[in-house]
Amino acid sequence: MKEFGSMTDEELALQYVGGNNRAFDELLTRNQSKLFSYIMFVVRDQELANDVFQDTFVKVITKLHEGKYTDSGKFSYWITRIAHNVIMDLYRQQRNEHIVEPTEDNDLSNLKINSVFDSSRESEIVNEQVLDDVKRMMNNLPASQREVVYMRFYQDMSFKEIADITGVSINTALGRMRYAVLNLRRMAKEHNMSLALMDF
């Protein structure tokens, strides 16, 4: 029997489903910081983030016991998807939140997915230099745009992963990123800041 420390999250989840409660404690310890950071970044309120975090893990436990998790090798993405759904349910209940979404008929077909981010070292350095400025402005973005920026820049997810987790198409995920970048550039211009993010 392997020690918990040497098990993957997926193995721990299956151990917990099999009745080992200590396996869940290890899962929680491993994932709570990253998951809470994601939630806090999206909702921007400590008390609300705590509620969302607790609701998320209640749903995780429930879904594990209902057999709705299979070892797909992406446990952290699975719980992030659950957290995303909890947050979206919350926003649906609180319609006073003004979440601005691009319209469905926006034509994003000319976007070249492979050219969205240049992976050269020079581009990485440029992007790193503006991230501090970006962080300060991101709080003013609509939640759906802020979420995509966080997943792409801070969790290093691909647009396919972002689309899967948030339950939208890749074009919609790309569109949200594009709108986020446009909004960030507008804010940067208003504050006379240079925002040298890569062009789409």
Image: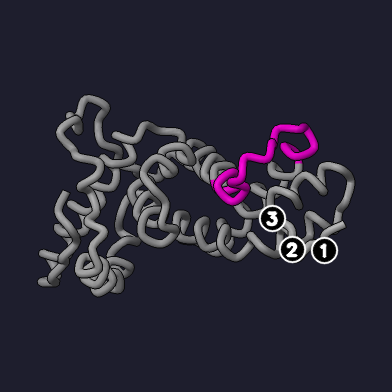
Query: Is residue 170 on the magenta stretch?
Result: no
Is residue 153 shown above or below 94? below
Q: Is mark 1 on a helix, strand or loop?
A: loop
Kindly check if marks 1 and 2 are in contact, taking CB atoms under 8 A apart as contact. Answer: yes
Q: Residue 146 at what x, y percent from top left?
A: 36, 53
Separation (CA) of disc 1 from disc 2: 6 Å
Q: Residue at x 24, y 74 (%)?
A: 129
Q: Nearer the viewer, residue 167 or 103?
A: 167
- Quarter holding the N terminus? bottom right
Q: Crowding at label 2, few (<14), some or many (≥20) Cα neighbours within 10 Å?
A: few
Q: Residue 3 carries which label?
A: 1
At label 3, the amino acid type is Thr
Range of residues picked out in magenta: 62-80
Sequence-wise, which precedes: disc 3 or disc 1?
A: 1
Q: What element carries label 2?
A: helix
Separation (CA) of disc 2 from disc 3: 7 Å
Q: Name the residue under label 2.
A: 6
Q: Which residue is drawn at 62% across and 54% down?
A: 53
Q: Name the residue under label 3.
A: 8
